[in-house]
Image (tube, rainbow, N blue to C red):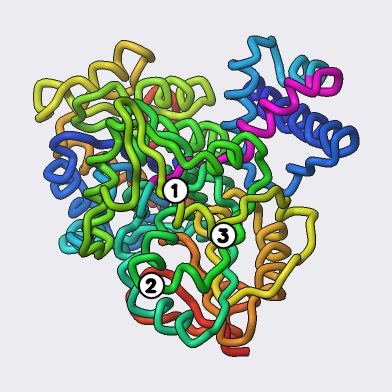
Amino acid sequence: MRTELVAIGASLGGLEALQRILPALPEGFSPAITIVQHRHARITQGVDLAHLLARNCRLPVAEPWDKEPIEAGHVYLAPANYHLIVERGQLALSVDAPVMHSRPSVDVLFESVADAYGATGLAVVLTGASEDGALGARAIKAAGGQIWVQDPNTAAAPVAPRAAMARTDVDAVLSLEEIGQRLAVLDARKAARPAPRRNRPRSKTGNPV
Amino acid sequence: MADTATRHQLEALEIQLLLTGVAERYGFDFRGYAPGSLTRRIRAAVAREGVSSISALQERVLRDPGCLGRLVETVSVHTTSMFRDPEFYRVLRQEAVPMLRTYPFARIWVAGCATGEEVYSLAIVLHEAEILERCRIYATDISDAALERARRGVFPLSDVDTHALAYRAAGGAGDFANHIVTDSKSAIFCQPLRQQVVFSQHNLVCDGPFNEFQLVLCRNVGIYFDKELRRRVLELIYGSLCKFGLLGLGMRESLRYTFLADAFQELPGNVRLYRRIR
């Protein structure tokens, strides 16, 4: 099943990890990407995290407005002190209580992706010091979607990827480089176009590898 | 996979039935609430009540007003904090205070005040600007329990430091401790702050306008409504705001793509503070 929406969860060490993944995404990348990076409530109008991540990314990166429509190939970063919720075709924000002391919370994002995108959702669990994201990953898996985790051995903080692996059967355990490479070939539009005449490698399921 | 789709459809149906039941029996209409956060909250209510399904929750809610009360709490109250988004209050000091000062008597509405943190933050700003006595703050919410807590104006002593930090970040030049009275366990906001505030129940979904205001704060409330309901609430607020009155929304809410985009001008400061110009 093609991926329509990617949800990435990151905590401790996440900034560096994201800065190694986002540059791998090609122009014209089709799935939308939502990101929860654990962050503190802003005390002052300080670092613009979205701006930082946009620097080496070919896709537009921004914090969404409440009820902003989800556009193909856009990267949406959960704003500080809000939960990011995905609805079908639209993003929503909430100020419900922190989950595992975090707002934004990865579980909140992932659970909403499971509800709204089901089998066309892909969750990626990156480095993190808490288990936030593990239950959400399980929900996405139960809804037919996919889970990739950053290899805990390569993670600045292995707790989050390990917790996801403990809660559910993940589809892949990858280095950051591998995550970037695999995302880059995930392009839904490419998958929908008819294959060129030369033989393209296919997996047992018949899907392009 | 078809199984998951069926489960989701069933859940959506149960939610619709629950909300219809609650609206018809009790008059609380949550049908226009944003689906993502509403679903989360209803699931939380099911877990909290210890029932086996949303249908089972409906059965209990329709018969037990106590259960309804708890559901209203779960579905409607948002959590907030003192001087949430401190830069908002800095801009309020710069932009709203001078405007309010021009009125011999100003009315302010905090719509969806929850447990009152925003109200007391506002009152502190106005008090330090020495205009609080000429203001009347109407703080409303759908939840009686939240209003009760807000009225009391009490918080744990252990929160004082956090609040003082937020106060300072929000441009407070004095001492946060001057605005509270403490005992060994708690702190309470001073009488001069509390006496200019009226807390009352008001339901943005179905109640009408009740006054005209120079300033309306409705921050992070509209995020819980779907587009249609949010439109109706914005209409209500617009109708309650005097010309050149100010409206404050949450940091990630915007009037830009709404029908009110041309009726308001955003003030400098990038904090979603708008002036009604039409």
Q: Secondary structure at mark 2?
A: loop
Q: Amino acid at mark 1?
A: Glu
Mark 1 touching mark 2, by CB under 8 A?
no
Question: Image quadrant for the C terminus of chain B?
Answer: bottom right
Q: Are marks 3 and 2 on the same chain?
A: yes
Indicate which disc, 1 or 3, sits on the residue closer to the N terminus.
3
Q: Secondary structure at mark 3?
A: strand
- Residue A67 left/right relative to B125: right
Q: Chain of mark 1?
A: B
Tag 3 residue: B110
Q: Does A207 sit above or below residue A197?
A: above
Quarter of image, res A45 = bottom left
As for residue B263 lying within the magenta part, the answer is no
Residue A153 drawn at (x, y percent): 10, 21
Q: Label 3 vs label 2: CA separation?
A: 19 Å
| Front residue of B197 and A148 | B197
Residue A58 drawn at (x, y percent): 24, 63
Tag 2 residue: B130
- Residue B36 left/right relative to B56: left
Q: Does B201 sit above or below residue B5?
A: below
For image coordinates 22% across by 40% down, the residue present is B161
Q: Is residue A197 visible?
A: no
Residue A206 drawn at (x, y percent): 44, 30
Q: Amino acid at mark 2?
A: Glu
- Residue A44 left/right relative to B32: left
Indicate which disc, 1 or 2, sits on the residue closer to the N terminus.
1
| Front residue of B164 and A111 | B164
Quarter of image, res B137 = bottom right
Tag 1 residue: B117
Q: Residues within 10 Å of mark 2 (few under 14, many from 20)?
A: few
Q: Is residue A55 visible?
A: yes
| Viewer-side label of 3, 2 | 2
